[in-house]
Image (cartoon, rainbow, N blue to C red):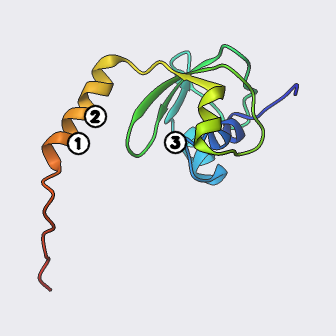
């Protein structure tokens, strides 16, 4: 595979549910390459590092393989390395621990 669009890659490795969401993230500046906004049509290369802000997490990934088709999550993780800084990982763990009470609150109309 010679060329692979960034939006297709991000969708294939399952960071976004649809390519449309991946394009929207690129267009809104939520995907960065070398600190600059990355366009959806950018060609992905082995070794590239991207900062990606999704709904739940700020990722930092390194491309370890090119994949054109969406596969199961267990297979998708073989095509990138999660190099997200430890402080971001800790922030996510803290959020999950502090906001989950196990109780459901009923809303009144």
Residue located 54% across and 43% down the image: 25
Query: Residue extending furthest bottom?
Result: 109
Label whose residue precedes the other's in the sequence (3 or 1): 3
Residue located 16% across and 67% down the image: 104
Instruction: Compute the Cα span from label 3 to label 2.
Output: 23 Å
Label whose residue precedes the other's in the sequence (3 or 2): 3
User: Residue 42: image x %, image y %?
Assistant: 72, 29
User: Residue 105: image x %, image y %?
Assistant: 12, 69
Find numbered disc 2 in the image and state the secondary structure of the residue it sits on. helix
User: Residue 107: image x %, image y %?
Assistant: 14, 77
Q: Which residue is mark 1?
A: 96
Tally of marks: 3
Left or right: 74 as drawn, with respect to 1 = left
Mark in the foreground, 3 or 2 = 2
Q: Are marks 1 and 2 in contact (CB under 8 Å)?
A: yes
Instruction: Compute the Cα span from label 3 to label 1.
Output: 26 Å
């Amino acid at each position: 595979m010679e060329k692979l669009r960034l939006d297709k890659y991000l969708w294939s490795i399952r960071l976004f549910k649809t390519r449309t969401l991946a394009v929207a993230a690129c267009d809104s500046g939520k995907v960065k390459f070398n600190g600059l906004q990355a366009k959806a049509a950018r060609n992905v290369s082995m070794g590239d590092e991207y900062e990606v802000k999704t709904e739940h997490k700020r990722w930092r990934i390194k491309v370890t393989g090119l994949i054109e088709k969406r596969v199961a999550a267990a297979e998708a993780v073989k095509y990138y390395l999660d190099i997200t800084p430890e402080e971001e990982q800790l922030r996510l763990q803290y959020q999950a621990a502090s906001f989950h009470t196990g109780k459901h609150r009923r809303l009144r109309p």
